[in-house]
Image (tube, rainbow, N blue to C red):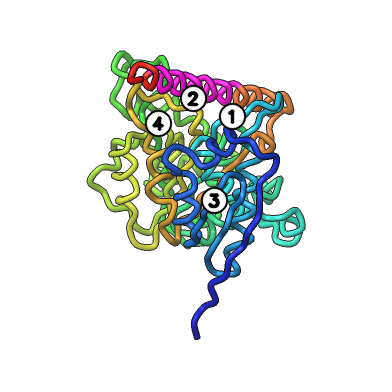
């Protein structure tokens, strides 16, 4: 029996050509991404749209397009461009974002020495469930959203249940303003202070003595990402923290280290890249390349998911607004250069 192909027509309002141009993106890149993810055809004329595809896919695509169109205007009513990350985020939220009712009904609890660790909001709870259900999970968002803490909690839970034999925690050796070559010791000793948040989470969940014992026996390994090269990590729960500071090659290297009966969680904040200018983030690249790979989970957090001091949430939101203004300025500069080029040709 053939699956029915149907169509859906709707319009976007208010009709603003500049916002529509930002919605579709350069060369309709945003539109093409939606079509690939949902296997639908989208045609448009001005603000009139027509979707063709499987019946169950049309309404979600309509909601995505309407949501993205809503993000093409700022609080001052000015048209603003969409970043690739915004498009990823809206698509992923449509596919995965839980409702508050689901949060109440399906809240996951992880038992640790400290007690039960639970997601404090719907996104955190969904993140924990996705870690438990998928072999590879990405947690992407600003500081304070619990990405690393919850990943470590899941790792400890898997180890204590005997689902894995060891925990491997790693991160790239890159920090803004730091020249590791001038620090004393080998690479592991130089990077060790930057791994302190991982130690703190482990001490809180397992206790100091147990962590020390596990470290001595190699049950828990905390090491720079460079130490992962050439290894295959089986029967392990692996966490790559601060992954926005990996290069494309490093990210590929890490993901290909995953062996049998292994689970990997990759956390990062794409607004906090400390790589040298001109070097593309491995996390951003992975978002582009792996977004359609089945059995992977991408989880995006926003400022509203910050669970630290309330002022931290305000700080994160202020930085998000600044980044948006910078993106607007870049788009305006590109448009001005394009207009100037067209004028010179004329």
Circle 4 or circle 2, nearest the eye: 2
Which quarter shows the C terminus?
top left
**For the residues bearing labels 1 and 3, Cβ distance under 8 angstroms:** no
Judging depth in this view, the residue of 345 and 4 nearest the camera is: 345
- Residue range in magenta is 322-340
- Which residue is tagged 4? 245
Quick check: 264 above or below 143?
A: below
**For the residues bearing labels 3 and 2, Cβ distance under 8 angstroms:** no
Judging depth in this view, the residue of 75 and 169 nearest the camera is: 75
Q: Which residue shows up at 40% across the image and 31% down it?
A: 245
Q: Looking at the picture, how far across and down is residue 239, in whole percent?
A: 44, 45
C-alpha span from label 4 to label 2: 25 Å
- Which residue is tagged 3? 44
Q: Badge 4, how many Cα within 10 Å: few under 14, some, many 20+?
A: many
- Which residue is tagged 2? 331
- Which residue is tagged 1? 80
Reply yes or no: does residue 38 show up in magenta. Answer: no
Q: Is residue 115 left or right of residue 20?
A: right
Q: Badge 1, how many Cα within 10 Å: few under 14, some, many 20+?
A: many
**For the residues bearing labels 1 and 2, Cβ distance under 8 angstroms:** yes
Quick check: 162 above or below 100?
A: below
**For the residues bearing labels 4 and 3, Cβ distance under 8 angstroms:** no
Secondary structure of the residue carrying tag 3 is strand
Mark closest to the chain's N terminus, 1 or 4: 1
C-alpha span from label 4 to label 3: 39 Å
Q: Which residue shows up at 59% across the image and 69% down it?
A: 55
Mark closest to the chain's N terminus, 1 or 3: 3
Secondary structure of the residue carrying tag 2 is helix
């Amino acid at each position: 029996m053939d699956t029915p192909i149907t169509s859906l027509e709707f319009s976007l309002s208010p009709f603003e050509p500049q916002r529509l141009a930002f919605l579709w993106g350069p060369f309709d890149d945003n539109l093409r991404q939606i079509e690939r993810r949902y296997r639908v055809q989208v045609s448009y004329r001005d603000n009139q749209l027509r979707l063709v595809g499987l019946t169950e896919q049309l309404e979600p695509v309509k909601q995505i397009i309407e949501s993205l169109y809503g993000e093409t205007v700022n609080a001052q009513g000015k048209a603003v461009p969409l970043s690739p990350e915004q498009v990823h985020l809206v698509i992923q939220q449509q596919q995965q974002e839980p409702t508050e009712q689901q949060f109440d009904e399906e809240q996951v609890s992880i038992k640790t020495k400290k007690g039960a660790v639970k997601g404090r909001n719907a996104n955190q709870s969904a993140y924990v469930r996705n870690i438990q259900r998928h072999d590879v999970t990405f947690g992407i968002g600003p500081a304070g959203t619990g990405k690393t803490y919850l990943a470590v909690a899941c790792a400890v839970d898997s180890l204590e249940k005997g689902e894995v034999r060891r925990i491997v925690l790693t991160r790239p050796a890159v920090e803004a303003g730091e020249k590791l070559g001038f620090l004393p010791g080998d690479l592991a000793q130089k990077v060790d202070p930057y791994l302190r948040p991982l130690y703190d989470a482990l001490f809180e969940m397992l206790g100091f003595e147990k962590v020390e014992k596990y470290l001595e026996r190699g049950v828990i390994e905390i090491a720079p990402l460079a130490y992962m090269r050439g290894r295959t990590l089986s029967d392990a729960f692996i966490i790559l923290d601060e992954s926005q500071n990996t290069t494309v090659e490093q990210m590929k290297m890490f993901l290909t280290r995953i062996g049998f009966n292994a689970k990997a969680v990759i956390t990062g904040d794409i607004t906090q890249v400390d790589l040298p200018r001109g070097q593309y983030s491995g996390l951003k690249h992975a978002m582009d390349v792996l977004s359609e790979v089945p059995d992977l989970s991408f989880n995006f957090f926003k400022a509203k998911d910050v669970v630290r001091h309330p002022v931290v949430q305000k700080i994160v939101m202020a930085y998000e607004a600044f980044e948006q203004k910078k993106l607007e300025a870049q788009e305006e500069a590109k448009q001005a250069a394009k207009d100037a080029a067209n004028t010179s040709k004329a």
